Amino acid sequence: MSDPAHPVTAAVIVAAGRGVRAGGGIPKQWQALAGRRVIEWTLDAFRAAPEIGPLVVVLHEDEMDRLPDLDLIRVAGGATRADSVRAGLEALAGTGVARVLIHDAARACVTPATIAGIVRALDSCDAAAPGLPVTDALWRAEGDTVAGPHPRDGLYRAQTPQGFRFYAILAAHRAHAGDAADDVEIARAAGLAVRIVPGDEGNLKITGPGDFARAERQLRARMTPDIRIGNGFDVHRFGPGGHVILCGVKIPHDRGLQGHSDADVGLHTVTDALYGALAEGDIGRHFPPSDPKWKGADSAIFLDHAVALVTARGFAISNVDLTFLCERPKIGPHAAAMTARLAELLRLEPSRVSVKATTTERLGFTGREEGIAAMATTTLVRP
């Protein structure tokens, strides 16, 4: 049962419509918006609202598997919006929910502040909805000709989420026949008084193709970039050979580097830095050295895999800084070639790639020329 002092508030997100006016070939709730699907922005706004408990999403019966999130209650919608909302409400019956907010998935720019305002209003009324007073002059028309002015006093533009005492709106929907423009219409038909609370001009409903650009501008203006920094470190010892491979560049030397793959300590280090920024472990997790498949392999394979993971997660590589620690071979004469090859593998401009070297003043294993060490730092950015 719901605690009267802390009533449980649920949300029903209506996403079963076809949205044909928006274009794009698929329903608007599944279309891309600022790097994500429209419905994902909407759901995250409600997840970010601490006042909201259970979250019901009403989907078309053919699209039930398009949101696998375990925290959602998924319900199949009906033939009309009213049918879909009723299905969402019925899914909450008997769960102890005291209040419910009903919202259109196409309003992806809704903010937690708007949600909180509706929830607060329900502390002292049975129903509340956001509205914006009409400020433009209004005309009556005959065909495409102005027939005269229309008073705008008392007129509001309706928005969602619209909030209600749960069992009051459930009863109203059960008693309502046919469709309705929104849930306020159904509530009023059942005799409920609906309080108007201030709406948000930014809480637009995506209806036509041009609305996507407006919504994207708003969402991107709110976005805080996700910035990740990763570090990599690797060591390979010298052994028999007549060259070393560093960042894909073959450099003559009186010994070679030993390793299960081609022992490219530069590419290994940068690869580990990328994995680290993604919290994806190291090369050994993805390409176990115990697997003979990778014996003598070109280390560009490992780096390609890490770069693909970065892209799949929606990040871009901002820069890479790689430092070799060795006495010989001298890195300076080959740094430009290594920079060019590393930039190519990373799909970056060379100006975003740094390759340099230092010695350890003849101290330690690198000072004794027993091997080469490398360390790298990389920055990833997701807008």
Image (cartoon, rainbow, N blue to C red):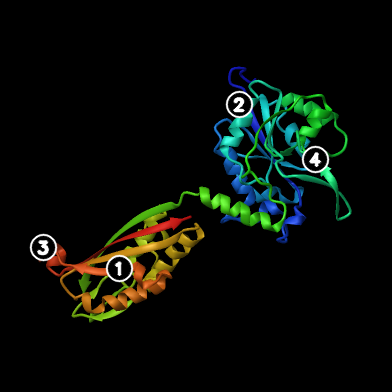
Q: Amino acid at mark 1?
A: Ser
65 above or below 337? above
The N terminus - image quarter: top right
Q: Where is mark 3, residue-wise?
A: 363
Q: Nearer the viewer, mark 3 or mark 2?
A: 2
Crowd band around label 1 with a 10 angstrom C-alpha radius: few (<14), some (14–19), many (20+): many
Q: Residue furthest left?
A: 362
Quick one: label 3 or label 2, which is nearer the N terminus? 2
Percent x, y for residue 68? 62, 47
In the rendered structure, the answer to whether residue 123 lies left or right of residue 174 reads: left
User: Is disc 3 in contact with disc 1, using a CB cutoff of under 8 Å?
Assistant: no
User: Is disc 2 in contact with disc 1, using a CB cutoff of under 8 Å?
Assistant: no
Q: CA distance from mark 3 to mark 2?
A: 67 Å
Q: CA distance from mark 2 to mark 4?
A: 24 Å
| SS at badge 4 | loop
Q: Is residue 172 visible?
A: yes
Q: Amino acid at mark 3?
A: Leu
User: Is disc 4 in contact with disc 1, using a CB cutoff of under 8 Å?
Assistant: no
Q: Amino acid at mark 4?
A: Ala
Percent x, y for residue 293? 42, 69
In the rendered structure, the answer to whether residue 149 lies left or right of residue 104 reads: right
Q: Amino acid at mark 2?
A: Arg
Q: CA distance from mark 3 to mark 4?
A: 78 Å
Q: CA distance from mark 4 to mark 1?
A: 59 Å
Q: Where is mark 2, residue-wise?
A: 120
Q: Residue furthest right?
A: 142
Q: Where is mark 4, residue-wise?
A: 181
Q: CA distance from mark 3 to mark 1?
A: 25 Å
Rendered residue at 34%/64% (across/down): 320
